[in-house]
Image (tube, rainbow, N blue to C red):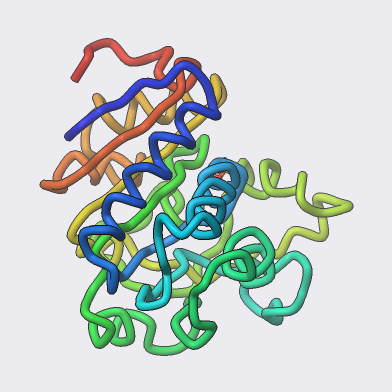
Amino acid sequence: MKLYIEKDYNALSERAADIISSFLKEKPEAVLGLPTGSTPIRTYELLSEKCKRGEISFKKVKTFNLDEYSKLSPVDKHSYHYFMDNVLFSKIDIKKENNFFPYEKYDEKIEKGGGIDLQVLGIGRDGHIGFNEPGSEFDSKTRETFLAEETIEDNSRFFNNKKDVPRKTITMGIETIMKAKNILVIASGENKSEAVSKALEGKISTEVPASIIQRHKNVIIILDKEAANNLKTGL
Ligand code: F6R
């Protein structure tokens, strides 16, 4: 496990964008697993800037998003599909047909696509990865799940009302995520520090889904200082 602790959110995002860019330079046809949420927004901006400057290209890249709200159409403003189109895909030279979202036979599609080379992950305050909430089995595959109360609360900032947050989602499973050849975790802010320390230093347990990454051979973690606040060791 390689750990970077950066001074702030912007530095964290620069580090993440640099790592993803180097990856694409080495493997232009890479298969990326991508999260939504607040944490990757600046990283995606930096990647689109690099693409505009011609430093990297997504022409041969395939992407598989981690999760999506059930029953929201791709053009619904609250869908993760819409988010990705807006924040990243419309700003880079990627082919639309190479962007995949978790609908039917997702695990098979990922395998057919060659498997995920680099899976980028955010982390929830309750230790979720994708929408694998506490209690999710380590051998889970892509499936429908229900959001935990804490996540509904957190995600309500993207909606007018907490009651508008869809409860049901489709998420890559923990096994799906762990099959990725490389994992890059990004976390920012004090409110993630407890989940981060449990995930990286705590017992590996389904109660903290992110703790499973301790078992992965190729993991890079990028935190800002606040998110690293609770870490006891330098790992
Ligand atoms: C989103 C996802 C979630 C988020 C997590 C952190 O696609 O899979 O696991 O990564 O909820 O969200 P932010 O970055 O908004 O704090």
Count up the numbered dots.
0
Q: Quadrant of residue 213?
A: top left
Q: Quadrant of residue 104?
A: bottom left
Of 132 and 117, the residue lying toward us:
117
Q: Quadrant of residue 4?
A: top left
| Whether residue 87 is visible | yes
Horizontal side of 16 relative to 76 (left or right) equals: left
Q: From the viewer's perspective, is residue 89 above or below residue 200?
A: below
Q: Position of residue 23 (x, y in %)?
A: 27, 54
Outermost residue on the right side: it is: 160
Q: Which residue shows up at 81% across the image and 54% down it?
A: 159
| Whether residue 207 is visible | no
Horizontal side of 131 relative to 235 (left or right) equals: right
Q: Which residue shows up at 22% across the image and 14% down it?
A: 234
Q: Which residue shows up at 28% across the image and 83% down it?
A: 113
Of 110 and 55, the residue lying toward us:
55
- Quadrant in which the N terminus appears: top left
Q: Position of residue 188 (x, y in %)?
A: 51, 29
Outermost residue on the front side: it is: 53
- Quadrant in which the C terminus appears: top left
Q: From the viewer's perspective, is residue 74 above or below residue 199?
A: below
Q: Position of residue 202 (x, y in %)?
A: 25, 27
Q: From the viewer's perspective, is residue 228 above or below residue 18?
A: above
Q: Position of residue 223 (x, y in %)?
A: 41, 27
Q: Which residue shows up at 51% across the image and 72% down it?
A: 93
